[in-house]
Amino acid sequence: MRTTGNFLLAQVFFCGALLSLFVIPCLAVATEEAAEATPLPVTQVLVSQEIPLHLPAFHEADRAGATWTDLLQEMPSVPGQQWPAAGREFAGHGSRAVKWQAVDAAGGHLPLSAGDGAGARYIAFYVTSDRWQKLELKVTGDHPVNGAVGGEALSFTKTGGEDGAPTVRTAELKLTIGKHLVVLRTLHHDELTAEWAFDLAVSPDNAEAVVALDVTPDHNVDIQTVLNAPRLGSVSLSPDGKLAAISLSEYRNGSDKESWLEVRSTRTGKLERLWRGDHAPSGVQWHPTGHQLAWQTNAGDKGTIRTFDFDSGEAGVALADVEHLGGWQWAPDGQSIIYAVTRKPKDDPRKVKRLLYPADRQP
């Protein structure tokens, strides 16, 4: 009887364990379904002033053509060097100052005003995450949109846009703990007849995640902020001390170095001029009198000294196409330039070597 009782008891435990294999996963699935997060509308954003756009000459050529989509793609994913904030400015085309302004988007709906001709705007907001997680960004609107989070380009999946249905774009935001900058850029032109407007929302991966949306750039300094901060190359003050030319560089993706030159007011810190990209000036010198900046460019073996006058806004050339141009400096009165050239001596046909320094004795 004891053996039979033990056998029955074992069967009861076995059936209970087997039942739990089915019940517990079902409960887990039901819990996960119940904990599905609700999309959060982006109710406040930063919107830039409109940036005028113009297609280049011969844009309709078969091989060298360009489209509005190409212009949008070539725009910087994150404009300026500072985190966007209401009232802050960044340099647009031709170094024209473009200002951010805070805009309320009721229910996540954001209408944008369009001026005459084609133009582009940036839209920015901040997402703060309490954990490592993936969010879905949903952008509903018929105008073209590109975007980035933390400086990394977003990959949008596009649906809709047919039979009068609005175009819906979704992208995955991979977030670590902390605050992240999301920047969208969009444009309008005469061929687009729909309203220039978007509905913006983000969806956390689960209801337990804490996600905050705002438009203030205040954030904690983390190790990435320190490691990725722009490196200061040099600072050069104008003779009257009113302007400062600041040479900066950074590694945006950890390997490709990007350099640029900023000229700012020493009194207000306002950006007066920005050169960025492969043709950014380096090794600049101020003219002894006035607000004229000079720098050297090289093409092959020839060097040219170029100038830019901040008072008149005119660019010029002080010295053109000098072979093997070396060091140079303005004369004290600013009326002339003293420069040096490098001459490489021809090989002596007698195979005789002149020894001037100890290093010359090395084989």
Image (cartoon, helix red, strand yellow):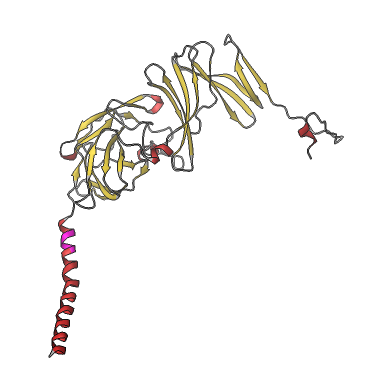
Q: Main secondary structure of the magenta part?
A: helix
Q: Is residue 263 left or right of residue 343?
A: left
As drawn, 286 above or below 353: above
Residue 29: say if magenta. yes
**Which quadrant would residue 19 be assigned to in this image?**
bottom left
Q: Residue furthest top?
A: 333
**Which quadrant of the figure has residue 215?**
top left
Furthest-right residue in view?
A: 350
Corner quadrant of residue 42: top left
Residue 323 appears anywhere in the view: no
Residue 126: image location, x then y, percent: 27, 38
In the image: residue 330, left or right of residue 53 = right
Residue pictured at 20% horizontal, 51% vertical: 208
Residue 74, can we see it? Answer: yes
Looking at the picture, tell me which residue is in the foreground, 224 or 322. Answer: 224
- Does 212 appear above or below 326? below
Residue at 23%, 33% in the rendered image:
112
Residue stretch in magenta: 28-32
Instruction: Confirm whether the magenta stretch covers residue 283.
Output: no
> Where's residue 84, x and y in %?
31, 31
Q: Is residue 74 left or right of residue 136?
A: right
Q: Quadrant of the N terminus?
A: bottom left
Out of 165 and 57, give the one closest to the viewer: 165
User: Which residue is depicted at the point 34% across and 42% down?
Assistant: 148
* Residue at the bottom extreme, as displayed: 1
27 shown above or below 135:
below
| Pick the front one: 68 or 178 | 178
